[in-house]
Image (cartoon, grey):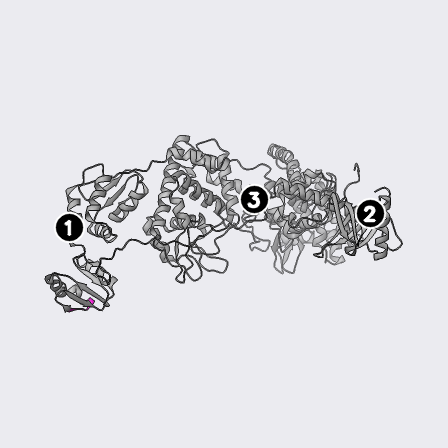
């Protein structure tokens, strides 16, 4: 429809949009789709609700938000030139610098305005720009919610409760003629403050101290406290309306006067372009990939070690959920990392579905069945699984050790760690990395500034200027802002990306670029050649150590972890053989011949004699003493050994008593008795009720099948093109039914318009009208209530009416449908022009 009438409401402005533009609105604000609006009027109403507008404002970049803030303090409606002037100022105080900034603002403003229009926050033609009422309420200055611009109320707003006599006194002090009513007095004072020439003359006559007071208030906050007997400079300003009373002790600088002092600018520092990222280093991309691959290998080894550590059942779960501080510290010691890093690895394994609660009465954490499948994957695929889980996770390990809103400590794997903004921040940080040349390490400070520009409202307003003393000598609010959540998430992202091998030496790796752009398969293909191949051998040393010069194949690593203790890690892992480690292997059911054969098969060096002697010596003594359950007993064929134990002072606490020449009884349990005798230097073995040696293999404990924790969404998901097309079509169809022109009848208005009121006719009138329409092929408008009680309006062309049903072509749904007549609330004929 080629109308030139400017839209009078947001609904009319949306109705004039094309389908692509409506789809863009729904894509930018997906919360408007739940549920799909019945028509354009309902869409406009929903787009103006407070929750939806707040969400839309939070997703604006800084200059688009500054544009909306400028419109909030501009007249409503405001022409484009007024908006531009509020952002650029009049340039009377900046000279060449203003020209450069003004050019950038002039170039960026159309794009910012297009963004606001696309998201239905601004509507109207350029000569009548209107900010959505809810957005104006959120962004306009008020004593309870100061504007980010630092501006105060207008003269009209600040003098709303002032007596007429006081207004006339202000006019007299400023040299203006008296008026006959308060409205004209306010208009005269406002005209003075907006007249650059007359305002400059008024300020030229002001005391220097009065100008200093204005300087402290001009960029906000505009409120200040005064004493009952103000100083002469403050009194001079108050007498001339440059400070207007808000309460008995508070005054405010009116908006018109502040804009004059600011040279017409709504913002102190407009930011039309995003801050550029600065590089701290330019590195060789191949060196970056190798460093990242090395860290990726370390990440895999750390997660594997964590799974092995909790293989037989991990720590118990706190009643409130999560790990206790003691258990986290114990895990950090075992992994040889600081506690915050241990919290990251634990949360990463949990988020990847490798760890979970076992659900038992004595609830503990344990590996999941999926962890066994993960361990069988190639190393590159294991890494992409971890990296993908990290990118999507909303759980935030950086919060561990802090406190929630109620002052309760936040524990690893506990509740309250989800932050819905985390995935978006991670991907945005990595996208900024990816926008730099390969091998470039960005400056973290400039990266944070860029993120704050892109989402200024998510973590709160931009850092405020230092607080200024009020006219009464006190501080007028403000103050430095704390670090916002998105900035902390970004800093944690930088650290976690380096730990995980996403970045190397501060720059994005090629495998991470492939993961972001092409997916897991491409990332694994990049990473696989950079990871070391698993080895099937070790190097045995004469000092009872074995050196693994690289990662070991899983069966070899598992067996070696039982037979020896890890002494050091790094590029090569050093294992040490001790009597205790050899006894551990024997307890697990290995014979001495098995251990000799294992070492000979997997060593590239001859098995040293000291190691062979150690195995044989431990095996010879292993099981010589037998411990069973009496409470416990000690059995040995050699009476001299039992006599030696009884004579040893260290056995006093065991309360041993001889039952037979070869048997001692103890009131201690078998487990503690076994450990006590081992501490005394013996090599006892536990035995069963049948007298056989018990094999004590490390039992693998697994949880029931578990799904990884589901990320907490930040908002509704972005709809795909198919859903957007269907939604736009449904909204257009509903709008057609809601706004189609109807014939006037004596009992009903000709058109309910966008309000959506349903037609009302008697059953007899409804039947007669649809029968007539079926005979003549006419199109009618009906109100319909479905089985769920939902009312809608439809435009139909009846084809057949019989059996209490009308079969018609539904123009709204674009298909043939059948409607029960008893569910039709009423019917009306369409006007001929429709």
Residue assigned mark 1: 617
| Mark 2 vs mark 3: in front | 2
Residue 436 position (above or below residue 418): above
Q: Which residues are magenta?
A: 652-658
Tag 1: Cα neighbours inside 10 Å, few (<14), some, or many (≥20)? some
Residue 466 magenta-drawn? no
**Earlier along the polypeptide chain: callout 1 or callout 2?**
1
**Earlier along the polypeptide chain: callout 3 or callout 1?**
3
Q: Position of residue 632 (x, y in %)?
A: 22, 66
Q: Is residue 257 left or right of residue 591?
A: right
Report the residue that reaches farthest toward the left.
640
Residue 278 position (above or below residue 364): above
Q: Position of residue 129 (x, y in %)?
A: 72, 42
**Earlier along the polypeptide chain: callout 2 or callout 3?**
3
- The disc label shown at residue 780, or none: 2
Q: Position of residue 433 (x, y in %)?
A: 48, 36
- The disc label shown at residue 455, or none: 3
Report how far apart the C-alphas of labels 3 and 1 lie in the structure.
69 Å
């Amino acid at each position: 429809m080629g109308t030139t009438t400017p839209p009078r409401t947001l609904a009319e402005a949306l109705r004039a949009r094309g389908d692509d533009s409506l789809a863009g609105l729904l894509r930018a604000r997906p919360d408007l789709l739940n549920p799909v609006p019945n028509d354009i009027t309902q869409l406009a109403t929903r787009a103006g609700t407070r929750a939806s507008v707040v969400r839309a404002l939070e997703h604006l970049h800084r200059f688009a938000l500054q544009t909306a803030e400028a419109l909030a303090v501009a007249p409503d409606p405001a022409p484009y030139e007024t908006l531009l002037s509020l952002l650029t100022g009049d340039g009377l105080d900046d000279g060449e610098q203003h020209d450069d900034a003004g050019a950038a603002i002039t170039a960026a403003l159309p794009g910012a305005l297009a963004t606001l229009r696309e998201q239905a926050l601004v509507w109207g033609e350029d000569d009548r720009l209107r900010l959505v009422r809810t957005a104006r309420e959120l962004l306009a200055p008020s004593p309870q919610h100061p504007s980010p611009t630092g501006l105060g109320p207008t003269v009209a707003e600040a003098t709303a409760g002032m007596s007429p006599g006081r207004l006339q006194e202000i006019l007299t002090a400023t040299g203006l003629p008296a008026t006959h009513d308060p409205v004209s007095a306010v208009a005269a004072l406002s005209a003075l403050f907006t007249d650059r020439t007359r305002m400059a003359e008024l300020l030229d006559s002001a005391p220097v101290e009065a100008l200093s007071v204005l300087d402290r208030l001009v960029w906000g906050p505009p409120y200040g406290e005064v004493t009952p007997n103000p100083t002469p400079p403050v009194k001079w300003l108050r007498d001339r309306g440059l400070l207007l009373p808000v309460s008995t002790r508070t005054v405010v600088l009116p908006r018109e006067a502040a804009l004059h002092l600011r040279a017409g600018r709504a913002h102190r520092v407009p930011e039309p372009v995003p801050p550029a990222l600065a590089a701290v280093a330019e590195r060789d991309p191949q060196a970056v990939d190798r460093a990242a691959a090395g860290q990726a290998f370390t990440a895999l080894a750390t997660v594997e070690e964590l799974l092995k550590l909790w293989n037989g059942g991990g720590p118990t779960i706190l009643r409130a959920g999560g790990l206790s501080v003691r258990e986290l510290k114990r895990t950090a010691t075992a992994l040889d990392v600081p506690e915050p890093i241990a919290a990251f690895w634990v949360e990463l394994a949990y988020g990847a579905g490798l760890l979970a609660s076992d659900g038992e009465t004595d609830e503990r954490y344990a590996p999941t069945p999926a962890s066994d499948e993960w361990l069988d994957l190639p190393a590159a695929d294991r890494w992409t699984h971890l990296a993908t889980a990290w990118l999507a996770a909303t759980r935030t390990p950086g919060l561990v050790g802090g406190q929630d809103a109620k002052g309760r400590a936040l524990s690893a794997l506990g509740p309250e760690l989800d932050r819905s903004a985390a995935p978006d921040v991670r991907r945005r940080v990595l996208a900024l990395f990816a926008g730099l040349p390969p091998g470039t390490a960005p400056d973290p400070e400039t990266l944070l500034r860029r993120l704050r520009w892109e989402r200024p409202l998510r973590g709160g307003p931009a850092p405020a200027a230092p607080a200024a003393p009020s006219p009464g000598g006190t501080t007028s609010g403000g103050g430095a802002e704390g670090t916002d959540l998105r900035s902390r998430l970004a800093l944690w992202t930088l650290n976690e990306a380096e730990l995980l091998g996403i970045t190397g030496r501060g720059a994005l790796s090629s495998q991470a670029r492939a993961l972001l752009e092409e997916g897991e398969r491409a990332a694994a293909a990049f990473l696989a050649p950079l990871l070391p191949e698993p080895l099937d051998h070790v190097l045995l040393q004469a000092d009872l150590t074995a050196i693994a010069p690289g990662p070991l194949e899983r069966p070899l690593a598992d067996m070696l972890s039982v037979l020896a203790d890890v002494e050091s890690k790094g590029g090569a892992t050093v294992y040490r053989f001790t009597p205790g480690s050899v006894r551990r292997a024997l307890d697990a059911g290995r014979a001495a011949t098995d251990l000799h054969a294992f070492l000979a098969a997997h060593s590239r060096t001859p098995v040293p004699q000291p190691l062979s002697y150690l195995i044989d010596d431990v095996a010879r003594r292993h099981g010589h003493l037998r411990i069973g359950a009496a409470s416990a007993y000690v059995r040995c064929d050699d009476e001299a050994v039992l006599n030696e134990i009884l004579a040893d002072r260290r056995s006093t606490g065991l309360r041993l008593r001889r039952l037979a020449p070869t048997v001692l009884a103890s009131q201690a349990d078998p487990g503690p008795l076994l450990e006590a005798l081992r501490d005394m230097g013996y090599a006892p073995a536990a035995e069963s009720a049948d007298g056989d040696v018990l094999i004590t293999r490390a039992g693998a404990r697994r949880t029931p099948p578990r799904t990884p924790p589901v990320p907490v969404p930040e908002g509704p998901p972005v709809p795909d093109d198919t859903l957007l097309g269907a939604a736009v079509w449904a909204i257009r169809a509903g709008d057609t039914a809601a706004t189609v022109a109807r014939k006037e009848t004596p009992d009903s208005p000709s058109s309910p318009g966008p309000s959506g009121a349903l037609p009302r006719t008697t059953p007899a009138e409804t039947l007669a009208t649809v029968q007539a329409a079926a005979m003549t092929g006419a199109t009618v408008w009906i109100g319909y209530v479905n089985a769920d009680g939902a009312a809608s309006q439809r435009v139909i062309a009846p084809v057949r009416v019989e059996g209490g049903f009308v079969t018609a072509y539904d123009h709204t749904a674009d298909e043939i449908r059948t409607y029960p007549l008893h569910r039709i609330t009423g019917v009306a004929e369409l006007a001929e022009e429709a």
